[in-house]
Amino acid sequence: MSDDPFRLGLDRFEEILPRYATEGPRYTSYPTAPVWNESYGPEAYRKELGREDIDPSDPLSIYVHVPFCESLCHYCACNKVITRDHSRADKYLDMIEREVAAVHSAVRVPRRATQHHWGGGTPTYLSPEQVQRLFGCVNAAFPIAHDAEVSIEVDPRVTTDEHIVALRECGFNRISMGVQDFEPKVQEAVHRIQPADKTGELLQSARSRGFESVNFDLIYGLPYQRPETFARTLDTVMELAPDRIALYSYAHVTWVAKQQRGFERKDLPNAETKLAIMLLAIRRFLDAGYIFIGLDHFAKPDDELATALRDRTLRRNFMGHTTQAGVDMIGFGPSAIGELRRSYAQSQRDLGAWEQAVEEDGVATMRGHMLSDDDIERRWVISRIMCLGELRAEEFEREFGREFSGAFASELTALKEMVDDGLVTIAGDGSIEVTSLGRLFVRNVAMHFDAYLPEQLRSGKQMFSKTV
Ligand code: SF4
């Protein structure tokens, strides 16, 4: 039998799976969002935005959340507003203009955006003219740097050639398409009918208009998915050959996305079937030459994510994996998150509440968190594990001026079970390496360094999806 864990039979996982198929964060932030609270409001965010100890050449990331979608995909746990009344977008754009002006006036040190990303919802719910208006407004306040990554998430069902032209005129150079699964029965069950031809045509259009990178989002764990059905989806994906692929585990979070309660338990793949689908997909991507990046991304070897992994600059934030370390992020739109050097800030989630807050104050911060020194160290540790699959004790010591194995002695002891299961190795100085097998359980490794998690789990409140 091969030693490659992605080629192991499922029987090899039978013993360890029950220990690690638990609930846990995905660590797009640390501390995780349930820790944030309302004592951090607009005033605190303004203060952090106004810090003067920032170099104008420090990179800055901009995120814009466009909340509208035309129809509801039943698996979706994003913050969105389902409406076919496109006139609602005009008020949203008016409010974005106010929000951008208010945030811009709070920023003391002007910087160029090295990353500019739109997510949603469905950003191409906006008409091409509205796309240009939105980009023009944000770019006037936070102009993009000449080599910036300018990226957008699109739904191929509503994205036209005119959108592609408008996006390129704005300067977008990376595009991410929601695909999830091409199987008709799965598409019907999740209420997202999206023929493969449509996705293929959009991909060709994006490439011919000069987009540098095309990403596909796939989800495993949806109703009726089985390894043999997902194999057909993978065949089509491999034919279309996107530059990047994000392979997400379906998050069954019915307390956030109530429509997920409509899924019958018996139709959802169990943990073993999910694992089988994930292993199948990983093998296909690796065989096709993609590099496995971080938790759930795959990229061609010359893609900048693969380069960032090699250079050890790969990081993770709310937009997924990113190539730039130490970047501040400012978010616009309902539920958007700002990540500044020492704090997180999230805007009002509900569209009406966000509009009202922007109208009254300009800044719509609903909650946030100031990071303590301990938070900053643990964020660093968790980011290394999640992004690079390893942590070098000497790097920690250089960064924080104290010995890693002494600072995290109890966490290293608690990792022993994972060492015994062959998921991690720990060197004499405390350096951690996640094994190839351990990559499938990397969230479980990171969870040992989360100081808030034990209390969160004890509370009995449902907060996180299953790790496997
Ligand atoms: S998956 Fe995308 S298109 Fe579907 S409801 Fe969610 S945000 Fe909208």
Image (cartoon, rainbow, N blue to C red):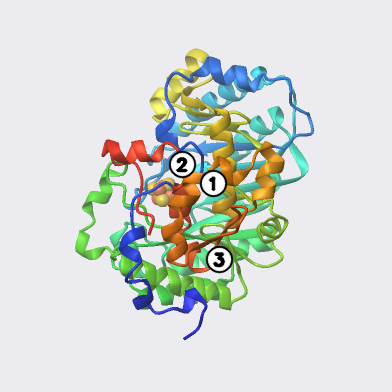
The residue indicated by pointer 1 is 382
Residue beneath the point at 67% across and 61% down: 306
Q: Is residue 233 above or below residue 53?
A: below
Cβ–Cβ under 8 Å for marks 2 and 1: yes
Residue 462: % across, % down: 29, 41
Determine whether label 3 and label 1 are within 8 Å by CB: no
Query: Where residue 50 sits: x, y (%)?
Result: 66, 19
| Quarter of the rendering containing residue 10 | bottom left
| Amino acid marked by disc 3 | Glu
Label whose residue precedes the other's in the sequence (2 or 3): 3
Q: CA distance from mark 2 to mark 3?
A: 44 Å
Q: How many marks?
A: 3
Q: What is the C-alpha distance between the residues marked 2 and 1? A: 8 Å
> Taking 267 as reference, is 47 above or below it?
above
Q: Nearer the viewer, residue 381 or 136?
A: 381
Query: Mark 3 vs mark 1: which is more N-terminal?
Result: 3
Residue 396: image location, x then y, percent: 65, 44
Tag 2 and tag 3, C-beta contact below 8 Å: no
Mark 2 or 1 closer to N-term?
1
Q: Nearer the viewer, mark 3 or mark 1?
A: 1
Q: Quadrant of residue 118?
A: top right
